[in-house]
Amino acid sequence: MPLQGYTIGRDVALDVMTSSGVLRFDKITKFTRKPKVGTQEIVPLNGQTDELQWPKGWNGTIIIERTNSTADDWQAKWEDDYFNGVNRDPSTITETITESNGSVSVYRYENVQLHLTDAGDASGEKTVAQEFTWTARRRKKVA
């Protein structure tokens, strides 16, 4: 539900599909996504600079509140697979946004490499936030 025409965080839903199935997070508190762009400046003798740009994928973070062992178990399995020589296929992230006009936009991040960047800090009477970092080859609009 947008608020007064603005997208707010609760308008965004994520689905993370890994090679071993759906990665379900109970409490996602933040999702960041940023496009990566390659550039090259060309400065001819007349001094009129041109800049070429091309897409180089996406990166971002998923921050969750730890409600169970999902993130820790996923990281442990990833490490086991690596040390046992098991090839792990890339993941996919699907982002669904309810727009202010009621329509729905769906974007799919493809060829996602995902890892647990921060397993969280345990401290008395505080929740434990965990952070995943990801990169994707590209983002496509699905709907």
Image (cartoon, rainbow, N blue to C red):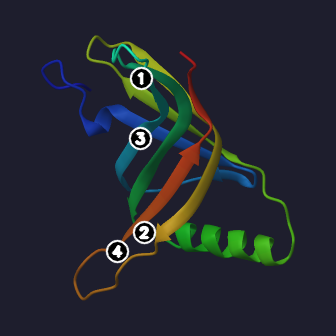
Query: How far apart are the two marked residues, 1 and 2, measured between alpha carbons?
Result: 54 Å
Rendering coords of residue 65 (x, y %): 37, 64
Query: Is 110 placed above or below 76 here?
Result: above
Q: Which residue is mark 4?
A: 128
Q: Is residue 15 left or right of residue 8?
A: right
Query: Is 50 placed above or below 86 here?
Result: above
Rendering coords of residue 18 (x, y %): 68, 50
Q: Residue at x 48, y 68 (%)?
A: 117
Within-10-Å neighbours for mark 1: few <14, some 14–19, many 20+: few
Q: Earlier in the sequence, mark 3 or mark 2?
A: 3
Q: Nearer the viewer, mark 1 or mark 2?
A: 1
Query: Is 101 placed above or below 68 here?
Result: above
Q: Which mark is residue 67?
A: 2
For this rendering, which residue is in front, 98 or 45? Answer: 45
Q: Amino acid at mark 1?
A: Val
Q: Secondary structure at mark 1?
A: loop
Q: Amino acid at mark 3?
A: Arg
Q: Which residue is mark 1?
A: 43
For this rendering, which residue is in front, 138 or 8? Answer: 138
